[in-house]
Image (spheres, grey):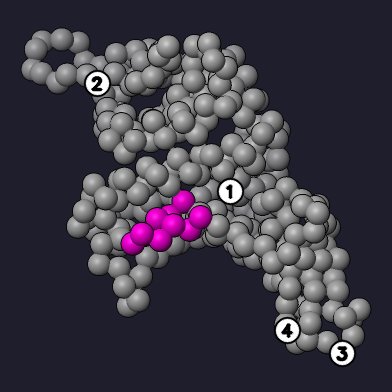
């Protein structure tokens, strides 16, 4: 049985007939990119477990619609109305209550959903870079001319008491997300790899957040046949509950604690230990870290 949103977005025909103009016709470039890179198919397969068999709207279509909504100027989930008014371009778009229920379902299993989305994005990016050929950001990359990932924090204003919004260092109120972009050089724009939503009072140079976002950014990258399948590598995990990070250092530094805290957060664990073997007594080289 084929799913109602199997093909996701219509493939409109362009001609010079005298017909009324369509709003957001430029978004055809985005929907064509979704199809060309295989993102629609990869994401549908990745998120199939979170979609009921007889659901009218697949969870992957809902997420893609939300991404398109942001791309054409929307700011809220309810702004999906921008797509809903042009079914010839965007197909069937879920209602606001359906979008809300789908997001709630995905949030209940967030770590697994994020990993599934990451794999779908990796497949789409690899396909896009392959299609780009000599124009791929990976073309001509070497030790002297490496791929460059830029980390940048930016402020987003919230006009009401939204979840996790907080005062910012510029005396505003809202969020302070940290973004990782792949630098395409002077001939292209940046390519978003990872964005972590943070409270407005989060610091711009917080090592823990930089480590976490860098690992998220590397996870979906495929280059020269090498897949960063496990950007996060754990030294020792005890009973699938406790992370032990092994060190041979003169002394523990704040960055070591920040690294372990990032591992705990990314793996949804609570307890970890830093173990330093460069000490006279092992009891002197143990630090307990709780998230």
Distance between the alpha carbons at the discs numbered 4 and 2: 59 Å
Distance between the alpha carbons at the discs numbered 3 and 4: 12 Å
Report the quarter where the N terminus lies.
top left
- Callout 3 touching callout 2 (CB < 8 Å): no
The secondary element bearing badge 2 is classed as loop
60 lies above or below 237 = above
Is disc 1 surrounded by few (<14), some (14 to 19) or many (20+) residues within 10 Å?
A: some
Q: Which residues are magenta?
A: 220-229
Residue annotated with mark 1: 196
Report the quarter where the C terminus lies.
bottom right
- Residue 262, given in percent of the width and then of the height, sits at 68, 58
- Residue 8, given in percent of the width and then of the height, sits at 37, 21
Distance between the alpha carbons at the discs numbered 2 and 1: 33 Å
Residue annotated with mark 4: 249
- Callout 2 touching callout 1 (CB < 8 Å): no
226 lies above or below 38 = below
Is disc 4 surrounded by few (<14), some (14 to 19) or many (20+) residues within 10 Å?
A: few
Instruction: Point out the tag, 2 or 1, that comes first from the N-terminus.
Output: 2
Residue annotated with mark 3: 280
The secondary element bearing badge 1 is classed as strand
Which residue occupies 67% across, 62% down?
234
Say which of marks 3 and 4 sits in front: 3
């Amino acid at each position: 049985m084929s799913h109602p949103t199997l093909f996701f977005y219509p493939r409109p025909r362009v001609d010079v007939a005298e017909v009324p103009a369509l709003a957001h016709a430029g978004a055809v470039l985005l929907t064509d990119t979704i199809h060309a890179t295989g993102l629609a198919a990869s994401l549908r397969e990745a998120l199939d477990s979170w979609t009921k068999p007889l659901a009218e709207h697949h969870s992957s279509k809902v997420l893609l619609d939300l991404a398109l909504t942001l791309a054409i100027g929307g700011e809220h989930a309810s702004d999906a109305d921008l797509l809903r008014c042009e079914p010839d371009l965007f197909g069937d778009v879920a209602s606001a209550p359906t979008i809300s229920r789908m997001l709630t379902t995905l949030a209940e299993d967030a770590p697994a959903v994020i990993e599934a989305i990451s794999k779908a994005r990796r497949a789409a990016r690899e396909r896009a870079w392959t299609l780009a050929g000599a124009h791929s950001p990976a073309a001509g990359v070497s030790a002297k001319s490496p791929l460059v990932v830029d980390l940048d924090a930016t402020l987003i204003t919230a006009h009401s008491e939204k979840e996790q919004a907080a005062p910012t260092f510029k005396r505003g109120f809202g969020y302070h997300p940290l973004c990782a972009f792949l630098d395409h050089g002077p001939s292209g724009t940046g390519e978003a790899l990872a964005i972590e939503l943070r409270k407005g009072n989060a610091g711009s140079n917080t090592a823990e957040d930089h480590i976490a976002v860098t690992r998220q950014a590397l996870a979906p990258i495929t280059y020269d046949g090498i897949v960063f399948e496990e950007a996060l590598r754990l030294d020792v995990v005890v009973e699938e509950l406790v992370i032990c990070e092994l060190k041979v250092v003169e002394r523990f530094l704040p960055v070591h604690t920040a690294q372990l805290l990032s591992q705990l957060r990314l793996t949804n664990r609570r307890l970890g230990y830093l173990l330093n073997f460069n000490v006279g007594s092992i009891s002197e080289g143990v630090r307990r870290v709780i998230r």
